[in-house]
Amino acid sequence: MQPLLHIKNLSKSFGNESILTYVNLQLNHNEVLSVIGTSGSGKTTLLKIIAGLEQQTSGELFLDQTEISEQPAQKRNIVYLYQEALLFPHLNVFENIAFGLRLKKQPNNDIKTKVEKMLHFLELEKHQNKMPHQLSGGQKQRVSFGRAMVVEPKILLLDEPFGALDSHTRTKMQVLFKDLVAKLNISALFVTHDIKEAIIMGNTIGKIEKGNWQQYQNKQAFYNDETSGVQNEIAFWKGIN
């Protein structure tokens, strides 16, 4: 089967500074690819190029075997989720989730059905009439997920989506997202700088370092790579014992 997203020899420079260098990446249908990298490694730039918010310097982007480099962001059916929930403060939970469907001018009955289904998935039925300022951080992030997923994007791009949450809420959100992936057949790139989170969230893993991309054949290959940081993490916990 052909990959859902296929990036070929993608590079990006700002002036004389090279940000991404000949990136070759594949994302399969119904797969979550964890993208691990430190701050400044180029991972956010990569997501913005896929979303259509930045233009690559060279290389090709194929979505379902169609080259999309010239397609504007709103035509790609790709949704970018930031670390901040970025909810509309003047809209309640129901209307925040419904926003993308209303933009597409879908019938009111369809919108009601889809939003209510999403509220159920996200365990937010009791909160649907609340305004964003009445929600906790985890609840805001769930609404943000709902708004992104209700429009059924081909790809979800997640840029450290749980980075601002406390550890307990972060763990709950990881479990929730894994559950939603299974229920809704989501295909996603999940960016994180946390090795444990990358392993938990992704079916597969890739590493970006100073603009250079390496995609691992499987998780075991990632564990075995001395430069991945996994062995250092294991050694740390062994040292505590």
Image (cartoon, rainbow, N blue to C red):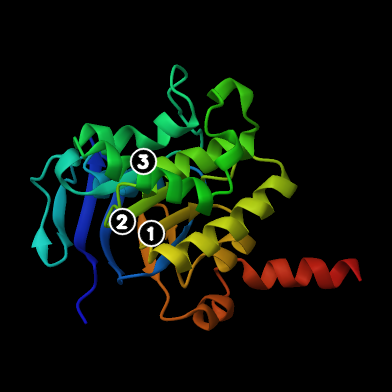
Q: Earlier in the sequence, mark 1 or mark 2?
A: 2
Q: Check disc 3 and report the residue beneath it.
A: 112
Q: Report helix, strand or loop for mark 2.
A: strand
Please give the count of numbered marks on the rendered protein: 3
Q: Nearer the viewer, residue 125 or 199?
A: 125
The quadrant of the picture occupied by the C terminus is bottom right
Is 211 above or below relative to 237? above
Q: Report helix, strand or loop for mark 3.
A: helix
Q: Position of residue 113 (x, y in %)?
A: 36, 47
**Left or right of 231: which side holds 146?**
left
Q: What residue type is disc 3 on?
A: Lys
The quadrant of the picture occupied by the N terminus is bottom left
Q: What residue type is disc 2 on?
A: Ile
**Left or right of 39: which side holds 7?**
left
Is 25 above or below relative to 41? below
Q: Decide: marks 3, 2 in contact (CB < 8 A)?
A: no
For marks 3 and 2, give the CA distance. Answer: 23 Å
Q: Report helix, strand or loop for mark 1.
A: strand
Q: What residue type is disc 1 on?
A: Ala
Q: Position of residue 213 (x, y in %)?
A: 36, 62
Q: Decide: marks 1, 2 in contact (CB < 8 A)?
A: yes
Q: Crowding near pointer 2: few (<14 within 10 Å), some, many (20+)?
A: many
Q: Crowding near pointer 1: few (<14 within 10 Å), some, many (20+)?
A: many
Is 150 above or below relative to 1? above
Q: Which mark is residue 188?
A: 1
Q: Is residue 40 visible?
A: no
Q: Decide: marks 1, 3 in contact (CB < 8 A)?
A: no
Looking at the rendered image, the disc whose residue lies closer to the viewer, 3 or 2, is 3
